[in-house]
Amino acid sequence: MIQTTYSSRAARFEAERDRLRRASRRLSNARLAVFVAVVALGLLLERRPDPLAIAATLVVVIAFIALIAAHRRTRERERWNDELVSLNREGLHRLSRAWEHLPIRTPPPNVAAHAYAADLDLYGHAALTQILGPVGTAAGAAALDRWLLQRDTAEDVRLRQQAARELAPMLDLRETLAVHARRTRTIRLVDLQKFLHWAESPGWLRGHRLLRAATWLLPGLTWLLIVLHATGVLAAAYWLVPLAATLALYFTAGSRARATFDEAFGREAMFAHYPQMLEALADATFQTPLLRSVAQRIGQGDTPAHRQLAELQRLMHLADLRLSSIHVVVFLATMWDFHVLRGVERWQRAAGEHARDWLDALGETEALAALATLAHDQPDWCFAELLPHGHGELEAVALGHPLIADEQRVANDVRVGPPGTFLLVTGSNMSGKSTLLRAIGCNVILAQAGAPCCARSLRLPPLDVYTSIRVQDSLARGVSYFMAELERLKQVVDAADRTQAAGESRLLFLLDEILHGTNTAERRIAARRVIRHLVDSEAIGAATTHDLSLAEEPAIADAARLVHFQEHFEEVDGRSELRFDYQLRDGIATSTNALHLMRLVGLP
């Protein structure tokens, strides 16, 4: 059903794009023909300047201008439909998990040291952010990153869940936002901060009364003296005096005015597309509290946000005269920059204090649209039930890994907790132990961001997630694999202590093959102590191991809930092949497969 929706929309937009492309070629040819006609009529007019030739030339020139405008509109509609084709094909790639065809989200700074971002594949190739909807604006990316990397209150998450449900069927609105947002990708978060700093600052020209008076007096006096000199009333060229004063202001105060223009208008893509995004939201009708709040925020004041930004865009075009070769002449005649600056500062006083809230609301809506896209793409997934902190268990029915395609995914019922217990997962190599940990972690992150989860149902209390799954050594830091794992475990243990002391949430730990970088005897002692400390800190979690004797350690045996994966062998063309069903079973694993895997790859 969802594949059909994306396929049909892609085909419709592709057909419209191709039609517009053909129309564009026809308009281009027409422009060339009319241009030739203009040249021919111009030559004719030069030889015989009669009224009929003048009228014909004027008509053809008007037709040429009209063709230019029509060609520009057609090209824009062609590009728009081409981007809609791309968006719908991306939808198909998300469903099939065709990672090589999906854009890769740039992670925020310092994400490598985050508690779970790398272990749970939030960013990069084959990552969680690739199955969410697109975010193009810097504010939208920042909002989505914040939701994925930080835990918010249950009430905030519930509001996002409601909004995501409402936005899920609104494909046209989400795609309109996405196309405009993609065109603003050159705007970085630091660019937005610079603009907002200017918008919220007091105007400069307003505090200079003499200069404001001079912007009217000097040009008026200059032109008056020019007229008097030209008509012979004044014998001397006294107009040179105010003109010289104007020129002095061009190099002094004028430089300050132009610096303000650069500060306010240095992000042109913002004014070209943000107003359209805000207008699309203003025209939509929402029912859920969070989206209604967004609509209210962008519509506050006498003039809606999109019209305010459109007015600032108009002023930007007026300020662009400073980039023209005739700028100095126009400035000397009118003191142009100061008059434009007066309009800019008028906008600053009327709307500047609201600009941050507009952009935050827009970014929040774009991030909600990313969650809604996942809800649209995966209608069988659930929104998590968020429990109060007093509850100590995570319970999931048919939990699967969200990065595995639907036709390949194997789901399992999973229960982690209550406090005082942990899930000890055993099984052979490649049987699914690490995938189970990542499935638990990814779904908790989705749940606490407000996104749908890859499960039939999921109930969980507030959880702070900490993982040790994909540990890497560091040649640059001189840190071995074992030391890197110790640093990660120290991070988990310290977080458990902080979480217990705060008493507002519970720590969820996910540990894969704990301390397998050292010898068996010491690993068993160290693992026992680490896990015991976590359990005593009222943390809940899961740990995988190949060391089956760990389950018999007296210090943790009473806390371990044993589950395992298993494999079986099938005869295929006279060969014994290893098969996995990835089904989670109670108890401890009873088989191993390392030697068989060695034979499969040809090792003796």
Image (cartoon, rainbow, N blue to C red):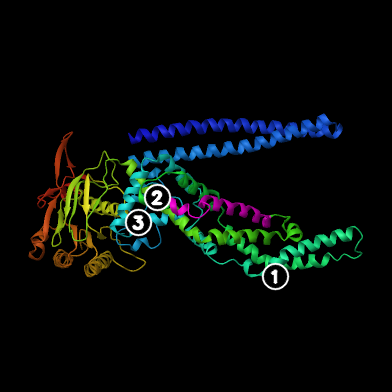
Q: Is residue 466 visible?
A: no
**Which circle marks residue 147 in the picture?**
3
Q: Is residue 445 left or right of residue 28?
A: left
Q: Earlier in the sequence, mark 3 or mark 2?
A: 3
Give yes or no for residue 311 being in the magenta stretch: yes
Secondary element at tag 3 = helix
- Magenta stretch in the rendered image: 295-323
Q: Position of residue 418 (x, y in %)?
A: 14, 58
150 lies left or right of 142: left
Q: Which three-letter amino acid code belongs to the residue tagged 3?
A: Trp
* Foreground of the two, 560 or 63: 63
The image position of residue 360, as x and y in percent, is 44, 56
Residue at label 2? 292
Circle number at residue 210: 1
* Image position, residue 454 (x, y; %): 26, 46
- In what element is the residue under mark 1? helix
Q: Position of residue 495 (x, y in %)?
A: 25, 67
> Mark 2 belongs to which amino acid?
Arg
Depth check: give the residue in front, 397 or 22: 397
Q: Which amino acid does the dot numbered 1 rest on?
A: Leu
